[in-house]
Amino acid sequence: MNLNELPLEIARLRVLGTKDAAYCGLNYGMWLRLSKSGEAPQPIKLTDRKYGWRLEDLQAWVEKQAESAQ
C-alpha cells in the first residue's frame, strides 16, 4: 500500500521527517527555530539524530496560522 492511500484516521498520525516539514511552507531552518521557541509543533525524536512531526499536528498548526492571519 502506498502511504498516500492510507485511511485518513491513520494518515493523520503519520510522522513526517524534517524535509517534509516544508509542508508548512517554511524552510527547515525557520521551522526548527519556530519549533525550538514553542511557536510550532514540537518534533518527535525518532533516533538520536532524526526528528519528525505528526501530520495531524502540522495540519492543525497551518489552520491556526490561517485563522490568525484573517
Image: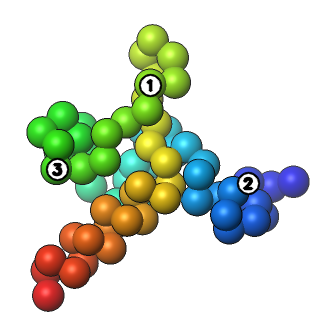
Is residue 55 visible in the rendered image? The answer is yes
Left or right side of 43 for 7:
right
The residue carrying mark 3 is 39
* Amino acid type for the residue under numbered disc 2: Leu
* Amino acid type for the residue under numbered disc 1: Lys
CA neighbours of label 3 inside 10 A, class few (<14), some (14 to 19), many (20+)? few
Task: Kindly identify the residue that appears in the image at 73 percent across and 54 percent down.
Answer: 3
Q: Position of residue 65 (x, y in %)?
A: 22, 70
Q: Identify the disc placed on residue 5.
A: none
Tell me which label, 1 or 2, sits earlier in the chain.
2
* Amino acid type for the residue under numbered disc 3: Glu
The residue carrying mark 2 is 3
- Residue mark closest to the camera, 2 vs 3: 3
Q: Identify the disc placed on residue 45.
A: 1
Distance CA(mark 1)–CA(mark 3):
18 Å
Q: Are marks 1 and 3 in contact (CB under 8 Å)?
A: no
| Quadrant assignment for the N terminus | bottom right
Task: Kindly identify the residue that appears in the image at 32 percent across and 73 percent down.
Answer: 63
Q: Quadrant of residue 66?
A: bottom left
